Image (cartoon, grey):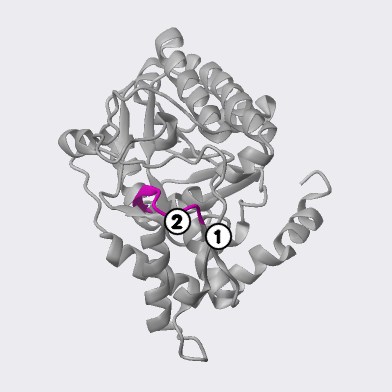
Amino acid sequence: MTLLVTGGAGFIGSNFVLDWLAGTDEPVVNLDVLTYAGNRQNLAAVDGDARHIFVHGDIGDFALVSKLLAEHQPRAVLHFAAESHVDRSIHGPEDFIQTNIVGTFRLLEAVRAYHGQLPETAQNAFRFLHVSTDEVYGSLGSDDPAFSESSRYAPNSPYAASKAASDHLVRAYRHTYGLPVLTSNCSNNYGPYQFPEKLIPLVIHHALAGRALPVYGDGLQVRDWLYVGDHCAALRRMLDAGRIGETYNVGGCNEKTNLEVVRTLCTLLDELRPRADGQSYAMQIDFVADRPGHDRRYAIDAGKLERELGWRPAESFETGIRRTVRWYLDHPDWVEQVTSGAYREWVGRHYGAAA
């Protein structure tokens, strides 16, 4: 009994691997190409653990993925690997097309071949769980109902479009080839090990460094915030009891404007790590030009996941954001490494120039 996890050194993937190994003895084969956002340090707690098998490689490498499947015979594949930052997709969309679409296609092809040769009992037990995003649904108006699993796809960024395409591929492999797939579409995650390009860790990092806290436009864009540990719990339930071929939306039930999130972070930092001059970190807030095509509101209706699988988020935004701020304050060495370039230099030395 083994899991194959793709992108398991990234933010959500590494949290899932750590969470999984803390609660079960089932081994994990962790395949990650270690881009700037994939970090072996995220997995330091399981270094030397025989249950964790790390493989440096690309989901687009059909031969490698096929070899891992044949060697380890996993009962499930959890597909986290993706380029995921909207701003980066606007400035350089090609990486998103290659990883999120072409990479997912090649992964699916390898899994399809593997699944096809399994004995019938193992075929029936196998699952491919594809982890996606609420951004595939586009943008909501202030009074629109939250996204449900039946919401139409209307992606508005190259990132969202690439994830929408990967969702469609996964669906097609179920209907065409009978691959036993599940898809999750989650809202904005936050928590430990998130690379400081995303809003919450970026604000914490900039605040402590005395830098401006950039807020796009008027800051009133609304997102539903999901603590990463709650997301991991939802994925475990989907893997255990989700219906084959189904999509489940995963949300935190915490709609907040970006400006509200930034001000909450400033208040927490004022309490936990006050500025030397006694002033609030809120004075560092800086409104900047909005990004192109910025979606106004996302909101998730996770009722299906609750009704069918009994999942609800354990963390409120108030408890989850406090835990998150404390984690970043307690791990300055991790932040320093991922923001200084030292980690990329280590990857180059350890894995070669191709890394």
Give the residue displayed 29% in from the left and 39% down from the top: 300
Task: Indicate the position of residue 215 as horizontal and vertical percent values.
Answer: 50, 58
Q: Which residues are magenta?
A: 216-227
The numbered dot on residue 19 is none
Residue 219 in magenta? yes
Whichever of callouts 1 and 2 sits on the residue coming sooner in the sequence is: 2
Which residue has dot 2 on it? 18
Element type at marker 1? helix
Identify the amino acid type marked 1. Asn
Q: Residues within 10 Å of mark 2 (few under 14, many from 20)?
A: some
Above or below, 251 relative to 68:
below
Q: Residues within 10 Å of mark 1 (few under 14, many from 20)?
A: many
Residue 129 lies in what quarter of the image?
Answer: top left
- Answer with left or right where residue 115 lies relative to residue 255: right
Residue 121 lies in what quarter of the image?
Answer: top left
Identify the amino acid type marked 2. Leu
Q: How many marks?
A: 2
The numbered dot on residue 42 is 1
Residue at the right extreme, as displayed: 353
Above or below, 276 relative to 272:
below
Residues at marks 1 and 2 touching, judged by CB atoms closer than 8 Å = yes
Closer to viewer: mark 1 or mark 2: 1
Comparing 127 with 330, the one in front is: 330
Residue at the bottom extreme, as displayed: 277
Task: Indicate the position of residue 271 as horizontal and vertical percent values.
Answer: 37, 83
Task: Indicate the position of residue 76 as horizontal and vertical percent values.
Answer: 43, 32
Residue 354 in magenta? no
Residue 123 can be seen in this image: yes
Comparing 310 with 152, the one in front is: 152
